[in-house]
Image (cartoon, grey):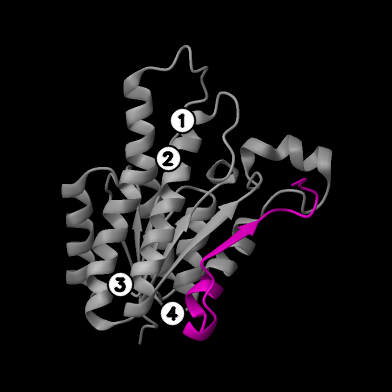
Amino acid sequence: MTNGVAIIVGVGGGLGAALVRRMATAGMAVIATARGSGMIDALAKEIEGAGGRALAVPADASDEAQVLRLFEASDRAFGAPDLVVFNAGAYRPKSILETTASDVEECFRVGCLGGFLVGREAARRMVERGAGTILFTGATASLRGSARYFNLAVGKFALRALAQSMARELGPKGVHVAHVVVDGQIAGPYYEHLKRERGPDALLSSDAMAEVYWQLHQQHRSAWTQELDLRPWVEKF
């Protein structure tokens, strides 16, 4: 038996992997997606080894043809998704004086165009049956553009606008759309020094974040959240 179908787009070793594991633990059949196959192949094998159902589908979220193939693979393997999470992103910290047009275009294509393509295909399937959840992962840069991080902010600002517009259009059709502002560093190998400096629970836990995404999917439609922010207790805001 399955508790629905989840597609997680943008699976790395942190939040993406935690989302795949959390949805599998909830009994969902999970499609794990990333540009490369190494991480998602290992995750799918892990879940299937524990008795779950999972499929690894490599895809570039900024490529329309690949996104279409991703959803078609889900349709064939498990059926239309009940939950879709867009967790992909790209940025290149640079001065505005040094950034090329191709830098800006690539970051926007991954950070926002990918969200549109994934969100549209999810919505087409969910509206048809009048139910489903679409979640977008945002960042501090969704609300504030910082020096040298405009490449991230431009895409994240736009992704937030996309989520708001989709929520207003699709909510009355039974589809829950929410945007999650991730305000802080997610715990992982790259931030071990910050963990030592700041103390216990000073960085965002991927597992704790994945639990919140699951709770968003479980919300009753009389009390849907459209946007929430996640930050560790020590983070200033």
- For marks 4 and 2 on the same chain, the one whose residue lies earlier in the sequence: 4
- For marks 3 and 2 on the same chain, the one whose residue lies earlier in the sequence: 3
Mark 4 and mark 2: Cα distance apart in space = 33 Å
**For this rendering, which residue is in front, 119 or 191?**
119
Give the secondary structure at mark 4. Answer: loop
Q: Which mark is residue 151?
A: 1
Residue for badge 3: 81
Name the front one of labels 1 and 3: 1
User: Do residues under tags 2 and 1 come within 8 Å of each other at their CB atoms?
Assistant: yes
Residue for badge 2: 155
Is 108 situated left or right of 228 in this image? left
Q: Residue 27 carries which label?
A: 4
User: Do residues under tags 4 and 3 come within 8 Å of each other at their CB atoms?
Assistant: no
Give the secondary structure at mark 1. Answer: helix
At x 82%, y 42%, the residue is 198
**Residue 31 picture location, percent across and down:** 33, 63
Task: Give the magenta part as a residue range.
Answer: 214-237
User: Do residues under tags 1 and 3 come within 8 Å of each other at their CB atoms?
Assistant: no
Name the front one of labels 4 and 2: 2
Callout 4 environment at 10 Å: few (<14), some (14 to 19), or many (20+)? some
Tell me which amino acid carries mark 2: Gly
